[in-house]
Image: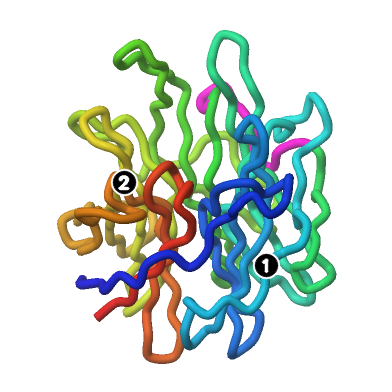
Amino acid sequence: MRWTKHGVIYCADRDNEWALTHAALPVPLRLNDDVIRIYCAFRADKNISRIGYVDVSADNPKNIIGVSPKPVLNIGKPGTFDDNGVIPVCAMRRDDTIYLYYGGFQLGGQVPYFLFSGLAISHDGGESFERYQQAPIIGHTDKETFFRTAPFIIHEGALWKMWYIAGSRWVEHNGKKLPHYNVKYLESNDGLTWGDEGYTCFEPEGDEHGFGRPYVIRKDGMYHMYYSIRSFSKPYHLGYAQSADGKNWIRKDNEIGLDVSAQGPDCEMICYGAVWEHRDQTYMFYNGNNYGGTGICFARLE
């Protein structure tokens, strides 16, 4: 693959007290033939994130059409799994509703935080969302204790297929606790009820300790996964894998063709890639430095 970068689309610039910085984890959704809505996480004080959106032209994503004036999904009630921040992961249409699968942060005592996954549903075209339930739809289990999050979901026939990250370990590195987790796979009959432990697609290798949001598309009879790699030796960078069945993957990270720049908004890291096809074009929406602190970046496949 070879991508041409087109720079930053949008970044919060302290215009709203709920969205002071960032535009992290871009999640595209087609509003119509002309407009792509990109859900993302804006940060406020104490780095607490809430979910909003940026609407862009489908023909030229650098052309901003609108930005959400308020959060479409706020943080959860005190004591719930998402009371310290919410991040979008996957948005999909289901009949006349929109499902938004998201991650929720809750601070820990002996560990820095817990990260589980919820579902919010919109009945007004994606302008606002209501939680399906106050509890996570994939929460902690005996096998996946601290993290069950970043669920990317495809609905195929009678099955809902989920790729997500899960783990039960924190590891020490240079005096800092870092999460350790794998990419896993689950199936559901309704998109609401999922199993307690997923099938392991692949695990960290070498000095890797985890992965960021898996983003999966199916094309030409194959599943294609784009994900972020977390390692001890370097900041986030992108990976790519292929699978015939969605469960067993062959990593082809050297084929991703998109890495950090010599300077600019993605000169330190590149992460959270989301691939989007529009007519004869293929886009990659992604984040650069500081986990989206420099905003949503955009590249086009050559």
Name the residue beneath numbered marker 2: 269
Residue 124 - label: none
Question: Taking 42 as reference, is 177 left or right?
Answer: left
Tell me, yes or no, whether the highlighted magenta stretch contains residue 241: no
Residue span colored magenta: 135-144
Q: Quadrant of the N terminus?
A: bottom left
- Residue 43 position within the rendered picture, expressed as x and y whole percent measured from the top left: 62, 43
Query: Would you place residue 89 above or below residue 148 in this image?
Result: below
Above or below, 156 relative to 42: below
Residue 265: percent from the left, percent from the top? 36, 54
Residue type (three-letter) at the residue carrying disc 2: Met
Which residue is found at the position 37% from the left and 67% from the top?
7
Give the amino acid type for the residue marked by disc 1 in the picture: Val
**Mark 1 crowdedness (10 Å alpha carbons): few <14, some 14-19, many ≥20:** some
Marks 1,2: beta carbons within 8 A: no
> Going 27% across and 50% down the picture, which residue do you hit?
267
Q: Nearer the viewer, residue 173 or 135?
A: 173
Classify residue 75 as left or right of residue 233.
right
Residue named by callout 1: 67
Tell me the residue at 58%/47% (across/down). Answer: 21
In the rendered image of this protein, does residue 32 appear above or below residue 14?
Answer: below
